[in-house]
Amino acid sequence: MIFHQVLNSYSGNYNARIYHNITCDPHFHGNHELIYNFEGTVQVTVSGNAYTLAPGELILIPPYTVHALVIR
């Protein structure tokens, strides 16, 4: 199921968070999302395409693009 993440869908929103060991189901929101991997691996799915981020890599997700992630 895809859901609208309202928390990240308003003007002027900026968040910086560090996550460990989470899974985020497919969702979308109105703001860009920049995911930077500090360590381990991050599995990101964007519009049905799967990516594995190694430490030091990042991905920019445009607004209203369905994406999901697993951080280990």
Image: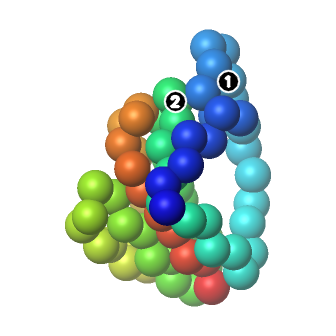
Q: Are marks 1 and 2 in contact (CB under 8 Å)?
A: yes
Judging by the rendered image, the residue that carries numbered circle 2 is 31
Q: Position of residue 24 (x, y in %)?
A: 60, 65
Q: Is residue 45 visible?
A: yes
Residue for point 52% across, 36% down = 29
Q: Position of residue 59 (x, y in %)?
A: 39, 55
Which disc number belongs to residue 26? none
Who is closer to the viewer here, 8 or 59?
8
Report crowding for label 1: few under 14, some 14 to 19, many 20 or more residues within 10 A (C-alpha).
few
Residue for point 28% across, 55% down = 47
Residue 27 higher or lower than 42, as above or below: above
Determine the secondary structure under disc 1. Answer: loop
Which disc number belongs to residue 13? 1
Quarter that holds the C terminus? bottom right
Q: Position of residue 55 (x, y in %)?
A: 50, 76
Residue 46 higher or lower than 37, as above or below: above
